[in-house]
Amino acid sequence: SIESSADVNRASQNEMKHVIAFGAYEKRHILLAAMWVLDRSYNMKISETIRGLLCLVDCLGVGHQCTSEERKLLQRLTNSIVSMIELRLPYEECIDWNVVLSIWVDKMSNIGIAILFDAKSSRRLQNEKAIELMRSLQEKQDSLFQQFNPLKNGCSAKGLKDAISRGSLDTKACDRSGLYLVHIAAAYDRVDVLEWLVEEDIVSLNKLDAHGRSALKVAESSKAKNATLWIRQRNASLAITKFFRNGVCQKKARKRMASMRHGISKLQAVCRGWSVRQATRTQVLMHVESSRLFQLIWGKCFDLIENTTSNAAGWSLARDSIVDFVKPSEEVPKESGVSDDMIETLEMLDNAMENVQETYFDDAPSHPKVDDTETKRMNQALPSPDIRKATDTTPSKTIQYTPHIVKWLKQGDPKYRDFFVRRITQLAQGERSRILAKRLKGSKVVTIYETYLEQKSGFRILWTEEGDDMLVWYVAKHDNVSRLVRLIDDSKARSNRQLVPAGSFVDPNHVAPSASENEQTNSSRIVLDPMGNVPMKVYQFGGIDEIGHVVEESWTPRLKLTDEERDVVETKGTVLLLGRSGTGKTVCILSRMDYDRQVNMQDSTFTQLFVARSRRVCKYVSESLGQTQNTIGNGNGDATMTNMTFTTFDELLSRLENALPRVENIRDVFRRSERMTFQRFKTEVYTGDKGIDPLLVWACIRSFVKGSIEATTQTDSHVVDRHDFLNLEIFGSRRCRLSVDEQRPIVYDIYEKYQRYMQEYNLWDDCDRIMALLQRLESSKTTAPDIYHQVRKRKIYVDEIQDYTQAECLLFFYLSGPGDLFLAGDPAQSVVEGVEFRFEDIRSVEYHIAKDKSGLLLQKPKTVNVNYRSHAGVLNTAGAILSCMFGAFPHSAKQLKEDRGVFVGPRPGVMYKVSSEMVESVIKTKLKGTVILVHDSSVSRWRRALGGYALVYGIRAAKGLEFKSVMVLGFFGELPGGIHKPWRDLLLGRANDGYQNMYPEVEGHMKLLYTAVTRSIERLFFVETEGSVAGDAFVRWITTTSMARNKHKNGAASQSVAATPLVPLASRNKVDDVESMTMTRDEWLSAGMDNAEAAEVEEDLLAAESLWDKAIYCFREAQDHDLARKARTHRASVRFQMKLPVLKGGDKKGKPVGEDVESEYRLLEVEGASVVESLLCEGLIEEAKNVCLRLIPYMSEESVEHLHRKIMRRL
């Protein structure tokens, strides 16, 4: 770089600094470069050259230490400078060269480089001034080197101190060999000098000499032992001190650093907080205000959540707890034939017996939980062996028990199971003492016994025995025993009555035979539920050893089946169970599901699916089977819950739509607002102007054109074409009763118009949805086999199968396969709008699935004909209506055997042409609690006409329910005017052979009437407020026709029937002659709970409100203020949800809304919080969560976040 510089000979000092700083070279390279510059600087002045060299030395950092090579180069450089002075000084005249030379000599002296100048030998110096200057510089340098001679000559440390203090000894200078003071002391083994120099901190032992050596190295090279030892000890001491000092310092430094970092973090946080607050001040204030408002609105709900969650009292538990909180409404009647003195004596014996039991049990304070010492006390309570010998003993018994016992064992305290096992084991072994078998008073039909479970809890075991069978009914508190005794006695009375054929009338005063005269065997005996006229599932222990398994968590109760139930339950393959209303079809489904579950206990892949149209039925079945929830082994010894699903048909479709993969060109979005219903069809598409009833047209479209099995086989359109619909070989007259020449073409024209209307407005109906699901399900077999197998079930159970089209039934076969279905229904109750059901339709669907697999085809349907709901008087009327319907429409439904009732009852009453005011008066005075059944479209009108009477139901809405007293009101007066005369002709026997083709709509009305009649349990009334042609004919027919005459008219009479007295089906009543009906408190409660449970699962808010009105009315009549208040709270929740506005456009969540709308939403939130608070007070947690979810779209994002965090998660 220097060589290539321009005009290097004139380089100034600054330029030389710049050149040196430009490159990163070693010192020796730069010194060599300086020598090269010096050799070529003959054109420069001496002073400029020396200044440049000084600049080089300063820039390179040449100081008190350098390497030996560098020292040699500097010595050469100094010698060259001297030579240059000798050569060029005579020819140059410079004022300041001596000053520059002195600076150079001083700098070289500091690193021990001497000036080699001899005036005598130098011939070139002829300038006396130069000679004098060089000598003076040499003398000065010699004096600097000689100041260390005293130390080398053994001067004392004190002398050195004085020399240093006088300034005659420079501590920063070095001698000729480059040794500094500390190095000279170390070389000459002067420990005292070293100590003084170090202690006074004059020099450091780590100082390096001109050769880069420390004092220790110099001492070692000079073999100065004492100095070497002392320096090593000193260095070791310093190292140790430094180690500990560094540790302490580092610790303090870390603390200071941490403190500093903490302080910095705090400062940063404060700064960030301040900056964020400044930037988001508005948002923060809004959030704080939102939190304050939320606390103000919802604050009362917080404290209620914890208490409510632990003690939830929803409607699912209310019915089960009725036994616990309902008190006896009347005194227990005295036993017949027992005098007052005897009763007093028995009471004294009972009190004495309780005192004796107290001697067996420890008198400990009552405690809700049973401690571990209670078992020992139980052993003490058991009679001694001597006492047992004195008691009566009977042979071993077969122990049977009811679902109430199963539920108590599953949900009760586990410690009580041990007591239950001990007591039942004693009873099964035949032990009988007054402690174990205390006979209770108040029963008339059967002897009921009471067994103390244990003393402190107050529980009693209630049981009966008949032959070798012992039936355990309840485990209940002592306060409820009297009421349960009456329920058990009434159940046995109803069960023991002789079965009454529906075709004959039995006098209400007829005395029922005793149990011994009953023709039923023990294996076929049916026990009715004490809380209703339905068969009760009965379980039994296989032996005494099995009783002990009750205490195990994996215990599974063993179901006891009657002969008829066993025939239905154990049938293999697909089973179709047919039975009229009230014959226990749903109970048979329960038994079959329980049986299948027990058979497949060890199969971990076994799955079951129950489907019904009604949520209430699904809930009833799930709760009934939940009482005996089973466990199955998975092969590893673990226990997992059986995979059972209970769902409505609509929920099943939604689940399948979400689970199945999408298929191109197949619709998979079905919005409720775009659904075509019958009401929409008859108002927007077809109003009846073609002379055919809109319901008939709707049924043909749903059941034949779009919902038949023939429609599913059409690969392109998935509908039946016109040619096939008019073909009698495909849709015969028995299947579709419309005439081929006139009515069917009109119906198909209406269908084409209907389909164009659907496509224009992008609408869909139920058939479109089913077809899309069938296609997606079929496609998933190959595209997504895992999903396909996941949605399939091993066993599927369908209730009310008559309410499904063939396409919908095909979906069930796809989900399970042929041979794995259990279908139950009543074709006579096919009242769903648009569904035409026949038994042959199921056969066609299964044949389409099974094809040549004959072993899987549906066999002859099973039937049940014992009616547990209605008495003979109601069954006679229902049977007569069916007989009349089959006479005119022989293929309208499967004709079954006559129903048999389990008890007798009065004939229905008829009141004709009575005013609405009179009807209102009679139902509020004499027939309080009677349910009014009307056409579904007239419910609101009749409710207003009857003064707001709550118990008004639509017939279709009441399907599946049962009521103690029913009044069919205005049925014939509200029929369409065009079918009054056809009804008259049918009832009066004037119908001709073509009647079924001319008036097919009458069939649906007769099924509707049959459904209304079979809702009655005890009393039935037909009331018409206006005269009509059909009403006149019906009154004449039902008051003059007997069941025997009606059967003879239809060609089904026999000798036994002909001999039956001709008693009319019903009697004509005057309003004043109607006997008053009273309902017990339990009956009111049961009716109220039926309505409450139905309302809880009802999706239609308007229908739910109506059901809650009915439930409140029943609870008021039962004088149960707690349940009435709970029902009112639930009704308030429904009414609030009905008030919520429909979100449109910008009102949707996440979009801005106006101030007026926001204020309205805030008021809704306040009202909703009040409703939730009331619900939590009543323990209605599920409804509270439902209200919160419904409120979310109307709340701000901040309020929604608070709602999820503070309420929803805790709920």
Image (tube, grey):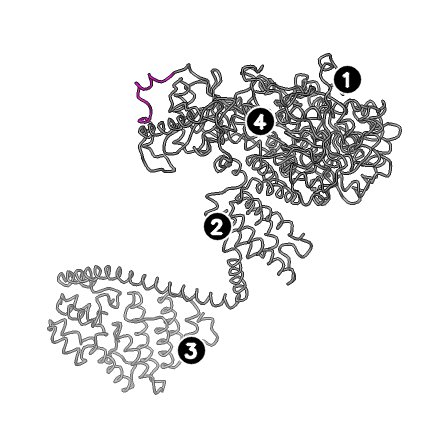
* Residue 1146 falls left or right of residue 721: left
The residue under label 3 is which amino acid type?
Asn
The image quadrant where one finds the N terminus is bottom left
Q: Of helix, strand and loop, which one carries label 1? A: helix
Going from N to C along the chain, the mark reached first, 3 or 1, is: 3
Based on the picture, tell me whether residue 728 belongs to the magenta stretch.
no
Rendering coords of residue 206 (x, y %): 23, 65
| Residue underneath mark 3 | 14
Disc 2: CA contacts within 10 A as few (<14), some (14-19) or many (>=20): some
- Measure the alpha-carbon separation of dots 3 and 1: 141 Å
The residue under label 2 is which amino acid type?
Leu
For the image, the number of numbered tags is 4
Disc 4: CA contacts within 10 A as few (<14), some (14-19) or many (>=20): many
- Measure the alpha-carbon separation of dots 3 and 2: 89 Å
| Residue underneath mark 4 | 590
| Residue underneath mark 1 | 1048
Residue stretch rendered in magenta on the structure: 379-392
Going from N to C along the chain, the mark reached first, 4 or 1, is: 4
Rendering coords of residue 452 (x, y %): 39, 28
- Measure the alpha-carbon separation of dots 1 and 2: 68 Å
Please identify the dominant SS of the magenta region: helix
Going from N to C along the chain, the mark reached first, 4 or 2, is: 2
Going from N to C along the chain, the mark reached first, 1 or 2, is: 2
Q: Nearer the viewer, residue 1035 or 1088?
A: 1035
